[in-house]
Image (cartoon, coloured by chain):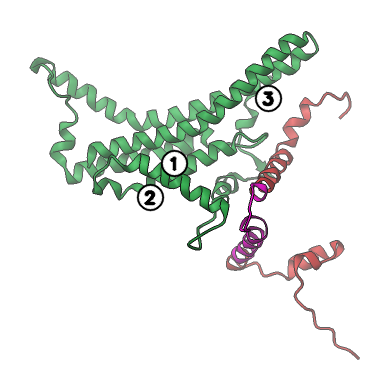
Amino acid sequence: MVLVVPVEKKLMDVKIKDLPNWILTQGFTPKGTMRAFQRGYYQYDNKYVNINKGSTLGVSMVLAADVLFNYCVSYKELKREQLRKNH
Amino acid sequence: MNENLFAPFMIPVMLGIPITTLIIILPSMLFPAPNRLINNRTIAIQQWLTKLTSKQLMNVHSPKGQTWSLMLISLFLFIASTNLLGMLPHSFTPTTQLSMNVGMAIPLWAGTVTTGFRNKTKMSLAHLLPQGTPTFLIPMLVIIETISLFIQPVALAVRLTANITAGHLLMHLIGETTLALMNINLFSAFITFTILALLTILEFAVALIQAYVFTLLVSLYLHDNT
């Protein structure tokens, strides 16, 4: 019988239906969360911002994501101003 | 209509938790720290701008006042980046909240006054009386100058709040007018849209200028007291 040892998977390798289980396997200490955010920050930074012939693309993507995020947060108040008759 | 007008200034809440802290932290993530001698373009531009601003702001001070340069430059960067980020559609500007601006103004002003009182008591007390006043006016003028001293932090905070809030409100109202006029008369809608475009340019300038004014006044109070 083969013993299956669970290997630590990165976020991009996890299938969507396994996502809640994967989140539970990550440690939830404050230090671990900080380190995860730091890793994410530097991964984005080195891929899009810290490049040789950089442009405004790296920062613009963050700003666009920020606009989308704020739209989602304020969607409930904006819903009232829609022009459709039935919401 | 009344509730919709001030809805952008309410604290954003996601799943019942106010996310103001995340929004305040966001501008700091847009300024990467310089790692090497020669950095990428983003960091190089930011370094150049910071050097320009810091020279402009801190040139007038004595070496003792220049120990405040880190504080003042980071204050300027924070207010400028927060105001500029608030120009994005749907975003929340923390500097529209009076609580935050008073929290920035009072400690900084108190710091400058305390520095002056501790190190140069005679000189900072002498600032309470302008030069060349007639003798019989002295008591009244001391009272007036004391009141104006205590109003400084309140003025700092309220100035920043009122400017940014008023600008955002105006843009909101004129934008709604444009939309409403589009069905009535297209030409007047076009004129209103031009006004909106000019106002947006003004708002970008105001965002930067307000940061500058805040920092400049704090540095002025510092100069008086060192």
- Where does residue A85 sit, x and y in percent of width and height? 88, 23
Task: State the separation of the CA atoms marked 2 and 3.
Answer: 40 Å
**Dot 1, crowdedness within 10 Å: few (<14), some or many (≥20)?**
many
Judging by the rendered image, the residue that carries numbered circle 1 is: B76
- Name which quarter of the figure residue A39 lies in: bottom right
In the image, which residues are magenta? A34-58
Residues A62 and B134: in front is: A62
| SS assignment for the magenta stretch, majority | helix
- Indicate whether A48 appears above or below B218: below
The chain carrying label 3 is B
- Name which quarter of the figure residue B166 lies in: top right
The answer to whether marks 2 and 3 sit on the same chain is: yes
In the picture, one chain is red; tell me its letter: A
- Where does residue B162 sit, x and y in percent of width and height? 49, 26
The chain carrying label 1 is B
Which residue is found at the position 64% from the left and 46% from the top? A56
> Which is more N-terminal, label 1 or label 3?
3
Q: Amino acid at mark 1?
A: Phe
Q: Label 3's element? A: helix
| Disc assigned to residue B70 | 2
Report whether A2 appears left or right of B15. Answer: right
Which residue is found at the position 39% from the left and 44% from the top? B54
Magenta stretch contains residue A48 = yes
> Which is more N-terminal, label 3 or label 2?
3
| Disc assigned to residue A40 | none
Q: Nearer the viewer, mark 2 or mark 3?
A: 2
